[in-house]
Image: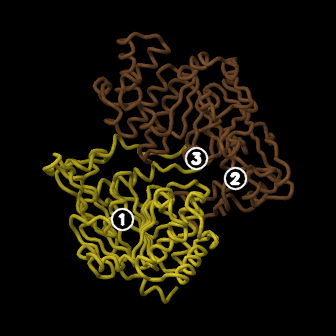
Chain colours: A yellow, B brown
Amino acid sequence: MSSNNGSKKDVLLEVKGLKMYFPITKGIIIQKKIADVKAVDGISFNIKHGETLGLVGESGCGKSTTGRAILQLYRPTAGSVRFEGKELTEMKGETLRRQRREMQMIFQDPYASLNPRLTVGNIVGEPLEVHKLASGKERQERVQELLKLVGLNPYFVNRYPHEFSGGQRQRIGIARSLAVNPKFIVADEPISALDVSIQAQIVNLLEDLQANLGLTYLFIAHDLSMVRHISDRIAVMYLGKLVELTDHITLYEDPLHPYTQALLSAVPIPDPYIEEKRQRIVLEGDVPSPTNPPSGCNFRTRCPRVMDICAEKDPEWKNMGTPENEHWVACHLY
Amino acid sequence: MAALLEVKGLKTQFFTQDGVVHAVNGISYKLNEGETLAIVGESGSGKSVGVMSLIRLIPQPPGKIVAGEVWFDGRDLMTLTDDEVRQVRGNRIAMIFQDPMTSLNPVLTIGQQIMEALQLHLGMDKSQARQRAIELLEMVGIPGAASRLDSYPHQYSGGMRQRVMIAMGLSCNPQLLIADEPTTALDVTIQAQIVDLVLQLRDQLGMAIIWITHDLGVVAGLAERVIVMYAGYIVEEAEVHELYEEPHHPYTLGLLRSVPRLDMGKSKRLIPIDGLPPDLIDLPPGCPFAPRCQYRTEKCTQETPPLEATSPTRRVACWNWETMVADIKEGGIYV
């Protein structure tokens, strides 16, 4: 691995001040914008070659929107997304399509993300056709190779999605995303819809593929234990903003942000003795609406350590660690 | 403690076009008054159908409870008329479900839905029921209960809706609360709120709880006793500490090993359970877990192991559990 060390430090993807607002409109013929859903509200981070960045947060915090905005499936409202130095937000048409070969997505719901009328061969082979990478016999061979790679029988090419279980469908989705030989994959809750005993199979597959193909992942999930298992670094998101970002060990051993602390303490641990002794930080109330987020710090309405300044000023996104071991946090306590 | 509920040989099947689905294959267990029992299993393990059968909430057809007795309060619920069951259901036995959005009626106010059960089961008049509904909402921690009574379900968040479901469940002071994956659709911070609330209400009201879930983490902080189900069978039953310290069934061990634990460092590699759960229409002969089991011997594929007591508090259905336990003693659960 020593030869990889040099390239491993290189930044593959750089996100700066990314904002994704969805307009709320009024009126039928003449539509007037009356407000914005601030799904992602100015976030910055980068992902290095060959690493897995975990993005965690509760439903509605904007983590999936972030993944989609990075891949330009939504066009960001503001901010910059640089992939190997190239600005993605300015790309259009054919240039963008060609760029998409390098970055693919794995979706959450293995039932909704596969076209029920296409055979597995056509589903996995479609990206090859779209990007004009292979056709005819060559395409067929490549599809069989991909199916083998994700642990499916290559003779399944003529079957339809309904003939497969959830875990097998997720493997088909993974094979499709790998068809164009991408460098970077956004995995949007790839295991949430699967049974516990199947989740581990898919996670192991993703880890093997990363080791063998040198992939870089943005792993989006709400399950903190699984994120910790798979990620090198973890970013915690709350109501459209990042609250904390550091490596997987520091985040769990020394979480700084009160939200991260609460989130970690809410994750149940399968050991009754530990559960009896644990002090849980139970957050009051619900996540506010992203249409009208609180002034100052987003989290102040539920924060157990709220201060006066939290309502007035947006906390700064700052590095509390060292330049080598970064520990980013946005909180007035620090 | 006296047994509140005793289930004997319960068997539920669904008669579909493709064949007979063997959802629950003869399960027996007891529940004491005030006890919290967790039933753990994956989708298709029969955990929900098994419990819905207790209160005869199985759609018939295609479903049918083909055998079994369910003794509750000195009566066999299987022999009661529909009217008599309705008197028990929602009154002595209450339920909360997984999805609080689809289990509330979107066109009725929250107040109307809570008051309905009060008027029906307890014979309250409208103003009494309204007063009680406010008390119930306050009890489950909904701020400004009196004014929120006239709101509709869509005006509540997911966690609040689950609180409303709990308020409705508790409205008639049940002896038994059945919770079918009540926190699965919720975020972890909200899940922690709901689990805390249910435990606090249990201590306050002294009801027994059957909590159905697939999450072994939630179970650890909540249950006194655990039943593990697989393919419509109970494969293991144990007191909660015993189960996590030393599982006796290979499936339980597989479940524990296949999820990463937050309190353990970045573990090397997860150990998944190979293969898929069996088709309930065409169950293999012998032990249903045998095709996926690392402790499988020839006997396992021929004879179904009975659920036998291995200690006064434990039962397990496995021919080779002693081999497995010896392995755990040597190498630990998490290898």
- Please tell me which residue lies in front, A254 or B288: B288
Residue A95, position in %: x, y?
A: 29, 80
Distance between the alpha carbons at the discs numbered 1 and 3: 28 Å
Is residue B1 visible in the rendered structure shown here? no
Residue drawn at (68%, 38%), measured in percent from left and top?
A: B15
Amino acid carrying mark 3 in the image: His
- Please tell me which residue lies in front, B75 or B330: B75
- Please tell me which residue lies in front, B329 or A106: A106
Amino acid carrying mark 2 in the image: Pro
Residue drawn at (42%, 81%), measured in percent from left and top?
A: A132
Tell me the crowding category of disc 1: few under 14, some 14 to 19, or many 20 or more residues within 10 angstroms, Cα based.
many
Residue under pointer 1: A67
Which corner quadrant of the image does residue B115 belong to? top left
Vertical side of A137 occupied by A17: above or below:
above
Vertical side of B204 occupied by A268: above or below:
below
Q: Nearer the viewer, mark 1 or mark 2?
A: 2
Q: Which mark is residue B107?
A: none
Residue drawn at (46%, 39%), measured in percent from left and top?
A: B99
Q: Quadrant of the C terminus of chain A?
A: bottom left
Residue under pointer 3: B214
Tell me the crowding category of disc 2: few under 14, some 14 to 19, or many 20 or more residues within 10 angstroms, Cα based.
some
Residue under pointer 2: B278
Please tell me whether mark 1 sits on a helix, a strand or a loop: helix
The lab-note entry on whether marks 2 and 3 share a chain reads: yes
Distance between the alpha carbons at the discs numbered 2 and 3: 17 Å
